Image (tube, rainbow, N blue to C red):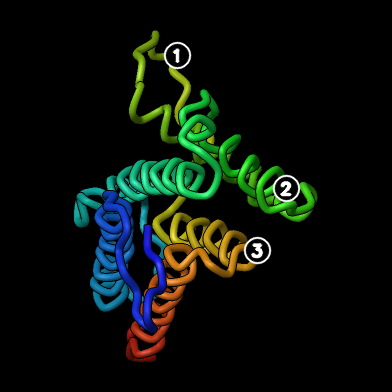
Amino acid sequence: MLTELDGGITQVRASALGDLIKVVILQQYGKLDDFKQRYVKYGGTALPEDQIETEWPNWTSRWIVAQTFTAMALEAFYYDYIQNEVSKTQADKKRTPPERFQYICCQHLSVDNEKIAECLARLVMLNESRTHWVHNKSAEFERYQKVKAFFSPDECLQLLIDVFTVISKHDLDCIVARETCSILEQVQKNVINELDSLEPHSK
């Protein structure tokens, strides 16, 4: 966690949050690079999924990595936040990551549950996706269920922004949420600028 001291930001306790979020950001930039190559080569032509996988073999894996590391980053943040702002006892209580988010918002920050309902629903789906990849279990081919919610790197970044926006809006002292949100929003702007710079004749 970070704190402001004498006009500067000081780190109080270390966590892997920054490293985890960096992995998500790299998936978004990697996806952007793949898309730019495809755009230059084929313009706006829709390609079959198997062709995309053949020419850009990291395309789907970027989804899986982004989902998994987004879930891990949020889980790390929730635990650290609850431990820092409430107590270690509360942080150690058995809750799913979405339940931790709901606890922080509704119990600690007194945010109306309806205001976080849409974000919470996506967090539940993200948790299902993460569980699918991390605790994958085999089944008969016809009965194998693929992951229910397949978030793209873009959607993962937006979900992180939405979570950190809620926290920073209702806890002005949470520098981690504020600064992380600022970094992620800049990544989004960078991606948009890159896409806008593509040559029109390549479409």
> In this picture, is 188 found above or below 56?
below
Q: Residue furthest top?
A: 140
Which mark is drawn over residue 142?
Answer: 1
Q: Quadrant of the N terminus?
A: bottom left
- Residue at position x 66%, y 47% in the image: 108
| CA distance separating discs 3 and 1 | 47 Å
Determine the secondary structure under disc 1. Answer: helix
Determine the secondary structure under disc 2. Answer: helix
Is there any visible trace of residue 51 in the rendered image? no
- Residue at position x 36%, y 15% in the image: 137
Find disc 2 in the rendering and name its residue: 117
- Residue at position x 38%, y 44% in the image: 76
Along the polypeptide, which appears first: circle 2 or circle 3?
Answer: 2
- Residue at position x 38%, y 75% in the image: 5
Residue type at mark 2: give it.
Ala
Q: Nearer the viewer, residue 44 or 74?
A: 74
Residue type at mark 1: give it.
Glu
Q: Residue furthest front?
A: 6
Tell me which corner region of the image, top left, top right, bottom left or bottom right, holds residue 79.
Answer: top left
Residue mark closest to the camera, 3 vs 1: 3
Which mark is drawn over residue 170?
Answer: 3
Is there any visible trace of residue 185 in the rendered image? yes
Along the polypeptide, which appears first: circle 3 or circle 1?
Answer: 1
